């Protein structure tokens, strides 16, 4: 049995570290600080971190097949040129909801971008103001879900026939039938309920065996869940409570990278959690992940 170890690798005290993506071509980890308004890229080979400022909240950043990245800044999908730090708006969502912002986002296996919104100043204001969108390579926007509280973790099964999704305040991980040719989703059902004391489901990834890994905000853990049964296979505890998201990476995808937040901790909690806002690498899990996808627009 392998020995699981948790290592802090980027001690950046992010306000809300989120959206880790392993870039295979660069062997680097991409992630964002939503409230810190920065996209970060960390190299394990050099332990060097590079950053681009976004001038508004940034919910996610993912590689773009044509080069650079696309990111969710405010309510806009933007193109990011890493060399020049130039940020160019491509398309906007939720035009009628100026108090919303983009949150988590990922590219699907076909190169579409999936991303969702939430109320910017949650928890004040009305519930269920968010939505889930897809952005096609030609920048056509399709709304798939409305009445969303906090659009969060997402991933696809290996055969692309199932889409997994988290609306955090529902305290569930849901599954949909997914049509890879059109991106259409339907037949929503609950895969598992997050239990009291486990925290709030946030970012998520799947491993190569199709099992879920769910970061639980205010739970200080990542849950490994069998989507067929909802059974917890493993619980990975971290030395911070506000764990936000996770992805597999490293040369053979056997490392799990986990982001965290420091925003919202009291003074005493901050003293007890000096690593809050850091990004962690978990080794010895005995499983491997899969490469991420790039946006083809």
Image (cartoon, grey):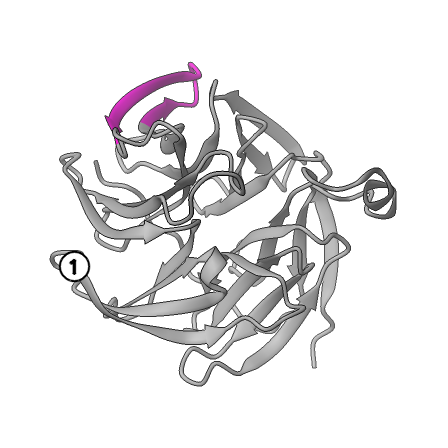
Instruction: Characterize the magenta stretch by its predominant secondary structure.
Output: strand
Rendered location of residue 186, percent (x, y): 20, 66
Residue 81 highlighted magenta (yes or no)? yes
In this view of the protein, which residue sits in the foreground, 3 or 72?
72
Rendered location of residue 103, percent (x, y): 43, 41
- Which span of residues is magenta-colored? 78-92
Does residue 42 appear to the left or right of 3 in the view shown? left
In this view of the protein, which residue sits in the foreground, 75 or 221?
75
Does residue 274 appear to the left or right of 283 in the view shown? right
- Residue lying at 25% horizontally and 29% vertically, measured from the top left: 95
Above or below 286: residue 69: above
- Residue lying at 74% horizontally and 42% vertically, measured from the top left: 265
Mark 1 lies on residue: 184
Rendered location of residue 144, percent (x, y): 22, 52
Q: How many marks?
A: 1
Above or below 134: residue 93: above
- Residue lying at 64% horizontally and 34% vertically, measured from the top left: 15
Instruction: Look at the image and tell me in which quarter the N terminus lies.
Output: bottom right
Around disc 1, counting alpha carbons within 10 Å, would you say few (fewer than 14), some (14 to 19), or many (20 or more)?
some
Residue 250 can be seen in this image? no
- Residue lying at 26% horizontally and 55% vertically, measured from the top left: 109
Instruction: Look at the image and tell me in which quarter the C terminus lies.
Output: top left
Rendered location of residue 229, percent (x, y): 44, 85
Residue 177 can be seen in this image? yes
Q: Secondary structure at mark 1?
A: loop
Residue 32 highlighted magenta (yes or no)? no
Above or below 199: residue 89: above
């Amino acid at each position: 049995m392998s020995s699981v170890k948790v290592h802090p690798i980027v001690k950046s005290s992010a306000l809300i570290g989120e959206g880790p993506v392993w870039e295979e071509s660069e062997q680097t980890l991409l992630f964002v600080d939503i409230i810190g308004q920065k996209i970060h890229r960390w190299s394990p080979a050099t332990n060097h971190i590079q950053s681009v400022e976004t001038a508004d909240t940034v919910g996610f950043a993912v590689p773009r097949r044509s080069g650079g990245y696309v990111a969710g800044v405010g309510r806009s999908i933007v193109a990011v040129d890493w060399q020049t730090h130039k940020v160019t708006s491509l398309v906007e969502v939720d035009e009628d909801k100026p108090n919303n912002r983009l949150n988590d986002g990922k590219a699907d296996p076909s190169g579409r971008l999936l991303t969702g919104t939430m109320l910017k100043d949650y928890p004040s204001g009305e519930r269920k103001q968010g939505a889930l969108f897809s952005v096609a390579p030609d920048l056509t926007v399709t709304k798939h879900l409305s009445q969303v509280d906090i659009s969060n973790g997402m991933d696809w099964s290996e055969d692309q026939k199932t889409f997994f999704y988290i609306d955090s305040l529902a305290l569930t991980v849901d599954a949909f039938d997914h049509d890879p040719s059109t991106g259409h989703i339907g037949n929503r059902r609950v895969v598992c309920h997050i239990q009291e004391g486990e925290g709030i489901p946030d970012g998520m990834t799947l491993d190569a065996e199709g099992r879920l890994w769910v970061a639980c905000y205010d739970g200080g853990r990542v849950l490994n869940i069998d989507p067929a049964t909802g059974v917890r296979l493993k619980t990975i505890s971290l030395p911070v409570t506000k764990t936000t998201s996770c992805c597999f990476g490293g040369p053979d995808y056997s490392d799990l990278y986990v982001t965290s937040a420091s925003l919202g901790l009291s003074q005493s909690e901050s003293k007890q959690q000096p690593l809050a806002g850091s990004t962690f690498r978990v080794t010895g899990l005995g499983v491997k992940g899969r490469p991420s996808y790039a946006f083809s627009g």
